[in-house]
Amino acid sequence: MLVSTSFSKTSDILVSIFSNSPLCSPTRIIWIDNWGNMPLPETAAIEVGKGQGLGAALSGRGIFPQLSIQMILVGEQSGELENMLTKISDVFENEVETSIMRMTSYLEPVMILVMGMCVLFIVLSICLPIFEMNQLIR
């Protein structure tokens, strides 16, 4: 999901900048920015440079979720690719944010238990010597 979010945001910005040029120029910049020299995205960039659509070049590669590929295809067909890339990045940003919030909500009770165990250890380390001294006096 994070890859899709990063790709969509970068694509949105570059498509708006290079609006009058072919899609292959921003596509190469996006691949280098997000993945370095991975062969799979590079072949998709070559396919886009040959005239194939961005959605068709990305489909079947296993890099992106099917939802983002379908939204890219719809954006290409309707001529609103820039707006669709913005929507894709918003959707996946919300998903990432939701999953992070869910993970932190699962982590909070565990942290409370660990802190409670630490406090228990400190209290016992202080109280046990006092109780042992009390036993020696009797």
Image (cartoon, rainbow, N blue to C red):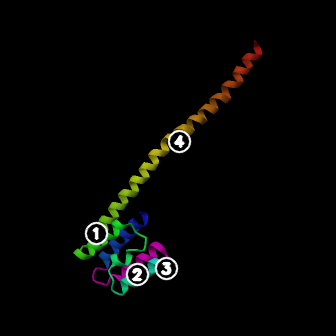
C-alpha span from label 4 to label 2:
46 Å
For the residue pair 6 and 46, the one nearer the viewer reads as: 46
Which label sits on residue 45?
2
Q: Residue at x 56, y 34 (%)?
A: 116
Question: Which of disc 2 and disc 1 is earlier in sequence?
Answer: 2
Q: Is residue 47 above or below residue 122?
A: below
Residues drawn in magenta: 18-36
C-alpha span from label 1 to label 4:
40 Å
Q: Residue at x 40, y 69 (%)?
A: 64
Q: Is residue 112 above or below residue 12?
A: above
Residue indicated by mark 3: 39
Residue 70 rendering spot, x and y as whole percentages = 31, 70
Q: Residue furthest top?
A: 138
Residue 48 rendering spot, x and y as whole percentages = 36, 82
Task: Please give left or right for residue 114 compared with residue 33 in the image.
Answer: right
Question: Which of disc 4 and disc 3 is earlier in sequence?
Answer: 3
C-alpha span from label 3 to label 2:
10 Å
Q: Amino acid at mark 2?
A: Ala
Q: Residue at x 29, y 65 (%)?
A: 87
Which label sits on residue 8?
none
Q: Is residue 67 above or below residue 127?
A: below
Question: Which of disc 3 and disc 1 is earlier in sequence?
Answer: 3
* Circles 3 and 4: CB atoms closer than 8 Å: no
C-alpha span from label 1 to label 3:
26 Å
Question: Which of disc 2 and disc 3 is earlier in sequence?
Answer: 3
Residue indicated by mark 4: 111
Q: Amino acid at mark 4?
A: Met
Residue indicated by mark 1: 84
